Amino acid sequence: MSSRLAKLRRSAFSAQNGCCFYCGLPMWEDDPERFAQTLGLTVRQAQRLRSTAEHLQARCDGGLDRPSNIVAACAHCNHKRHEGRKVARDWLAHKAWVQRRLSAEAWFDKAMLSRLWRAALR
Ligand SMILES: [Zn+2]
């Protein structure tokens, strides 16, 4: 990843208080082990909550590395936006879809989700 994009990701991460743009769950930037330990997750589970730079307008649709186009999203939400598609789902539609899955407790797995929710409420 370019250092410019990494910088944009870091500033989006702090502007969002370390929470994913789509699912609102906590993410980590540098230390998955510590994050896992704090939240009572396995390191493997924590990998899915790595902070990634997400282009609202996808790069393949001409989206630029600009502050207005970059948010911080967890690896899981980012991956699911593109999974099995040639064209990334529109970000607004993706956010609504993730929120619906969350309300149905069908995002990550239930045990992991309840740990994360408890942590988010602290
Ligand atoms: Zn997410």
Image (tube, grey):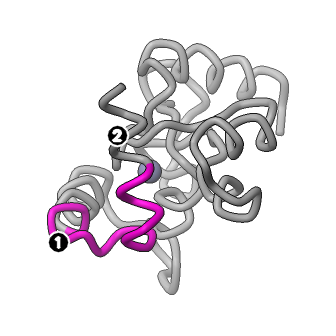
The residue lying at 53 percent from left, 43 percent from top is: 54
In the rendered image, residue 115, in percent from the top left (x then y), is placed at 43, 52
Q: Quadrant of the N terminus?
A: top right
On screen, residue 10 versus residue 107, left or right, reads right
In the rendered image, residue 26, in percent from the top left (x then y), is placed at 48, 37
What is the spatial separation of the Cα atoms under label 1 and label 2, in whole angstroms? 15 Å
114 in the magenta segment: yes
- Marks counted in the figure total 2
**Marks 1 and 2 in Cβ contact (< 8 Å):** no
The residue lying at 21 percent from left, 57 percent from top is: 99
The residue lying at 32 percent from left, 52 percent from top is: 91
Q: Kindly tell me whether mark 1's CB lies below 8 Å from ligand 1.
A: no
Name the residue beneath numbered marker 1: 104
In terms of secondary structure, where does tag 2 sit?
A: loop
Identify residue type, mark 1.
Answer: Ala
In the rendered image, residue 16, in percent from the top left (x then y), is placed at 42, 21
In front of the other: 40 or 14:
40
Name the residue beneath numbered marker 2: 24
Q: Residues within 10 Å of mark 2 (few under 14, many from 20)?
A: some
Q: Main secondary structure of the magenta part?
A: helix
**Where is 78 relative to 25, above or below?**
below
Q: Residues within 10 Å of mark 1 (few under 14, many from 20)?
A: few
In the rendered image, residue 44, in percent from the top left (x then y), is placed at 74, 64
Identify residue type, mark 2.
Answer: Gly
Q: Quadrant of the C terminus?
A: top left
Magenta segment:
101-115
On screen, residue 32 versus residue 71, left or right, reads right
89 in the magenta segment: no
The residue lying at 49 percent from left, 52 percent from top is: 58
